[in-house]
Image (tube, rainbow, N blue to C red):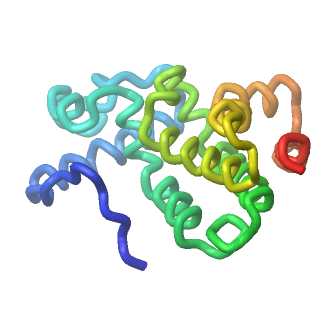
Amino acid sequence: MSALPVFNAEPPERADAARNRKLVLEAAGRLFARNPECVTMEAVAAEAGVGKGTVFRRFGDRAGLVRALISDTEIQLQEDLIRGAPPLGPGAPARERLIAFGAAYLRFLEVHGRLLATAEGASWLLSEPYALYRTHVSLLLEQAGCGDSAQYLADVLMAPLAAPAFLYQRDVRERSLEELTRAYEDLVARLID
């Protein structure tokens, strides 16, 4: 499988930068696994044995650090959307693809939702992954004949896939992943005939 071209891709890493990146991500993974709400960039730097400037320059903020931690999983999900087998990938009707996307993203949140929620908050709406997923959903809605409403309905379908909404349903409402997947399928079915 060839990698997707990345807009504004960074040049190849120097060996010391790659080593530091690995140390920081391993340290962040350990700290987030212990107590995600209490992780600071300073704590990650100390755990990794690097200066905090190294962490800030490389990742910018907590959201950037979290995105780097989950990037491999997210890249695979994006590859599956673009090149994967139907119904998640191309070749299935728009409604089936929307349902498959919802199910796949809910599984992604089951693994990474708590981590995303502690780091991102409202910045998720401004992130590149959100833009990709929202564009995917809006294009499928246009294919399904939603016309001028497709953009608004894309936000409606993305709302339950925000990590805080997902965690509320799992933790407070005590809904299983299977229940949430069925509910998302029902939501899509109500929007698209």
Q: Quick one: 141 or 2, which is closer to the camera?
A: 141
- Is 122 rendered above or below residue 90? above
- Is 192 rendered above or below residue 90? above
Residue 170 position, x and y percent, is 80, 33
Quadrant of the frame with the N terminus? bottom left
Residue depicted at 71% across the width and 47% down the height: 106
Counting every numbered tag in the picture gives 0
Q: Is residue 66 left or right of residue 5?
A: right
Residue 115 position, x and y percent, is 54, 35
Q: Is residue 54 left or right of residue 134?
A: left
Q: Quick one: 83 or 15, which is closer to the camera?
A: 83
- Is 139 rendered above or below residue 161? below
Residue depicted at 22% across the width and 28% down the height: 56
Residue depicted at 73% across the width and 68% down the height: 87
Residue 36 position, x and y percent, is 52, 28
Residue 59 position, x and y percent, is 28, 35
* Residue 161 visible in the current orientation: no
Q: Quick one: 34 or 152, which is closer to the camera?
A: 152
Q: Is residue 103 left or right of residue 47?
A: right
- Is 166 rendered above or below residue 68? above
* Residue 137 visible in the current orientation: yes
Q: Is residue 16 left or right of residue 25?
A: left
Residue depicted at 21% across the width and 38% down the height: 58
Q: Quick one: 6 or 139, which is closer to the camera?
A: 139
